[in-house]
Amino acid sequence: LDFSFEVQAFQCRLGASKTAVIAGVAVKVNGRRVSMVGNKIAVDGIAVNDTSRPAGLDVVGSPVAEMSLSSEDECVHFYTMRNSLSVSPGSMHNLNIEVASANASLEGVCGSISSRKPVQLSEALFTSPELAELYNMCPESPKVDRRLHGLGRQMSTWVPWSSPNEACDLANVSYVTAAEKCKALETTATFYEACIYDYCGSGGDEAFVQNALASREREVARARVYSPASPVVGKGPPAENDSALAPACQGLFMMVIICRIVAGVNSHQ
């Protein structure tokens, strides 16, 4: 594990609920750090504009609504869409990540339960001003500097709901109603269950149903671009034009994070 590609997300409480959404993201790739907090994008802590963006970084919208980033060797592709919310923190991110299978690691928050731990301040990809802005957006988030200096603000001990059924039960939202709202996704179990989970976790906000629908469409579209062609038996190694990826990156480990709400308020991880 060489940490050549790393993503950190800062989670904030969604309104007055006991759920959280991603309010800011920071990515390390090509030896540089790219962050998006609010509608501002920075590279190595310096705000970028249309003329100062490095190669591989694309931005859509004014104010910024989408950001995509690719590694120089085309083995990593990162995308985030920032959607507005009617409650705090004001917006949330949906992430798509494609990594060459040979380069993917199962360590980290999304990889394995055993590796889920608070990010230390010295390891944060966010700058101090960015953290200050995120703390203002999310006043209930435990500040890493306070935690490290023993001032008592610790990670939440809230245990995330283990299933869509539990999310609906504890949020007092009808599972039957949620399932009907998400019916268009029932042929895709991952999105269907996530849709129900998010609908109930948000207290019945239909915006999360639309979010799940749009996320599935986006994953399908990205799979067409980044999924490599399967080699034909007897043909030999795939040619470079067999795929949108270079041959060294044949085979992708694909991940879509459709704003899967996690109960409790966490520090950036």
Image: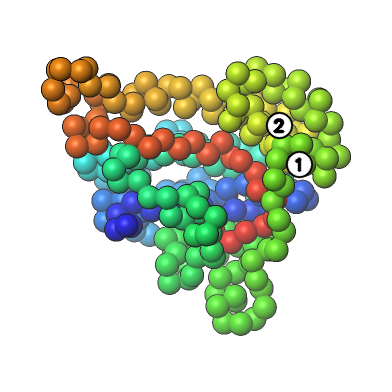
| Residue at the disc numbered 1 | 167
Q: Is residue 62 above or below residue 225?
A: below
Q: What residue do we see at 17% from left, 24% from top? A: 238
Q: Is residue 66 above or below residue 130?
A: above
Give the secondary structure at mark 2.
helix
Q: What residue do we see at 47% from left, 50% from top? A: 111
Task: Find residue 16 and report its horizontal and vertical position in percent.
Answer: 78, 50
Residue type at the position of mark 1: Ala
Return the residue nearer the eye: 131 or 208.
208
Q: Residue most toward the front?
A: 234
Task: Find residue 160 and report its horizontal and vertical position in percent.
Answer: 69, 51
Q: What residue do we see at 41% from left, 35% from top? A: 254
The answer to whether residue 92 of the structure is visible from this angle is yes
Residue type at the position of mark 2: Ile
Q: Kindly identify which numbered label has been placed on residue 196.
A: 2
Question: Which image quarter: residue 240?
Answer: top left
Q: What residue do we see at 35% from left, 46% from top? A: 104
Mark 1 vs 2, N-terminal side? 1
The CA span between labels 1 and 2 is 8 Å
Report the side of 50 relative to 174 (left or right): left
Report the side of 244 relative to 199 (left or right): left
